[in-house]
Amino acid sequence: MEVHFKPDVQAKLDRMARESGRPSDELVEDAVIGYFDELAHTREMLDRRFDDLESGRVKPIDGEEAYRRLMEKTDAQRHRPA
């Protein structure tokens, strides 16, 4: 497989290869493996969350309510004694 990068990305890859002493193809392979691992982990987490919602184990909350709760927590953190 052949991959082409924009010049700025290629320059970063070349610099990283020089600095690490590793071939650029190994760096790209490691990055792709890491990306797919993270993607699989995220997919599993989302599937579990969906299953929890669908089964009723978790109750959804409205976006406005979620935002309000987040702002309350943020306010509480800001006004917490040091």
Image (tube, helix red, strand yellow):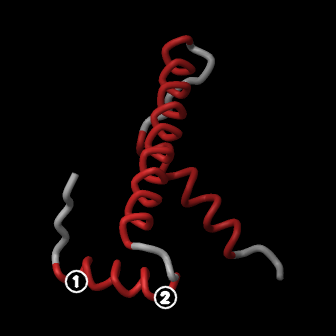
Indicate the secondary structure of the residue bearing disc 2. helix
> Residue 66 or 4: which is nearer the viewer?
4
Look at the picture and state if 9 lies above or below 1: below
Look at the picture and state if 3 lies above or below 24: above
Q: Position of residue 11 (x, y in %)?
A: 27, 85
How packed mark 2 is, by other alpha carbons closer than 10 Å (few <14, some 14-19, many 20 or more), is: few
Indicate the secondary structure of the residue bearing disc 1. helix
Look at the picture and state if 58 lies above or below 13: above
Q: Which residue is mark 1?
A: 8
Q: Residue at x 48, y 26 (%)?
A: 47
The three-letter amino acid code for the residue at tag 2 is: Glu
- Determine contact: label 2, label 1, CB under 8 Å: no
Q: Position of residue 1 (x, y in %)?
A: 22, 51
Q: Residue at x 64, y 59 (%)?
A: 73
Looking at the figure, which quarter contains the C terminus? bottom right
| Viewer-nearest of discs 2 and 1 | 2
Q: Residue at x 17, y 81 (%)?
A: 7
